[in-house]
Amino acid sequence: MSELIIIGYDDEATAEKAYDRVLDLRRDFVLQLTGLAVVTVDAKGRKHIETPGSIVGASTASGALWGMILGMLFLIPGFGLLFGGAMGALSGIAGRAGINRAFQNQVDGLLEPGKAAVVIMASKVTEDKFASGMAEFGGTLLKTSLSEADEKELEAELTGE
């Protein structure tokens, strides 16, 4: 099971500091990351995503899953595998997994021009230590879980297996 955590901040500088803290918490084994990104919104409302390549899981399927989730959440066509007839199936599975239109709207509500968010996908989170480690940055927290079965179904759909 994976946790999808999005923390919205009022400015990019705070999001960058929080992002660095997530990396520190990873090194301290507080969470096991399968995806990490900072999403910023410029003055024109365009979203920009920064991801460290070394975080995304080693398999092609986990990288595709992470790309698909980022693309769905931030409505960025071309980011991840968002093409073709498979999109309907992927949307249905993702919706059952908690990444539905309502969740997408909540995420979108966090990201106005000048704001930023840290997006975390983790297969393991020590909740109390994570909350304590991130508390100084504040922010607005959104969270959903992907069951192991949903992850496998999404990965299979993405890889055509």
Image: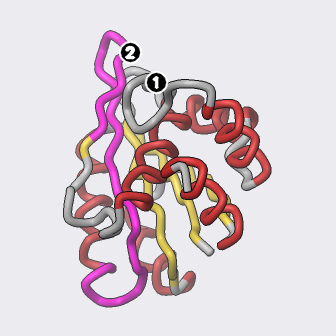
Where residue 24 sits: x, y (%)?
25, 77
**Which amino acid type is marked by label 1?**
Glu
Residue 135 tag number: none
| The magenta stretch spans residue 34 | yes
Residue at image location 32% in from the left, 80% down from the top: 25
Where residue 75 sits: x, y (%)?
51, 26
Q: Residues within 10 Å of mark 1 (few under 14, many from 20)?
A: some
Q: Farthest residue to the right: give it.
A: 96
Q: Quadrant of residue 12?
A: top left
Q: Quadrant of residue 23?
A: bottom left
| The magenta stretch spans residue 153 | no
* Magenta part of the chain: 25-49
Q: Which residue is mark 2?
A: 45
Q: Which residue is mark 1?
A: 112
Is 128 above or below relative to 122? Answer: below
Is 109 above or below relative to 34? Answer: above
Q: Is residue 104 left or right of residue 28?
A: right
Q: How many marks?
A: 2
- CA separation, marks 2 and 1? 7 Å
Where residue 44 sits: x, y (%)?
32, 10
